[in-house]
Amino acid sequence: MVFPVLLVILLSVLLVGSLPVWSGLYAGLSEGAMRPLQYLAIIMESGIAAAGLLIAVRQKRLFGYGIFLTFAIYVFYDMARLIPLQVSDATLYPAFFVATISALWAVILIYRERHGRPP
């Protein structure tokens, strides 16, 4: 558990030049300094969404659709924040909630599949 946290801190320092906010050592970077990290997150989220869709379509696993929907919404959310798309918070927050429900649904399906219960 410690290794992933240290890896995130190291990547944050290398990409952004400062420690992340949750480290307690945030130096107050400008919003522009966070852009490389935002782009990296969008690329990774897009890849995860694509992998989820491949799992759903090729392997015929229902939980793949949940993974796809969750990360597709994350990409939309991040893009709406990064590029001023004029999407209101009244749209973004419910979309983020749907992503959370979708992730929960996928986890339940994975759990049931692993423990021999039909979805």
Image: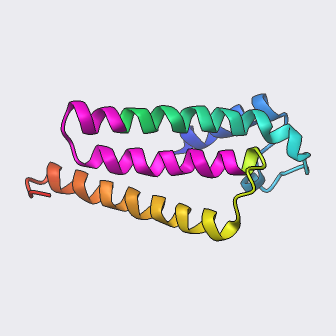
Where does residue 29 sit, x and y in percent of width and height? 90, 46
Residue at point 20%, 33% (across, down): 59
| 50 horizontally vs 105: left or right | right
Q: Is residue 5 above or below residue 43?
A: below
Total marks in image? 0
Give 16 or 61, whichever is nearer the viewer: 61
Question: For residue 117, which quarter of the picture?
Answer: bottom left
Q: Main secondary structure of the magenta part?
A: helix
Residue 5 in view: yes
| 84 horizontally vs 76: left or right | right
Magenta span of residues: 53-80
Q: Is residue 39 above or below residue 30?
A: above
Where does residue 85 sit, x and y in percent of width and height? 73, 50
Q: Quick one: quadrant of the C terminus?
A: bottom left
Residue at point 41%, 64% (across, down): 101
Colouring convention used in this rendered image of the protein: rainbow
| 2 horizontally vs 58: left or right | right
Q: Is-magenta flag for residue 113?
A: no
Residue at point 31%, 55% (across, down): 107
Residue at point 60%, 43% (across, down): 5
Q: Is-magenta flag for residue 77?
A: yes
Where does residue 88 sit, x and y in percent of width and height? 70, 65
| 71 horizontally vs 66: left or right | right
Where does residue 83 sit, x and y in percent of width and height? 76, 44
Give 85 or 114, whichever is nearer the viewer: 85
Q: Is residue 12 above or below residue 100?
A: above
Give 8 or 101, whichever is nearer the viewer: 101
Residue 7 in view: no
Q: Is residue 114 above or below residue 37?
A: below
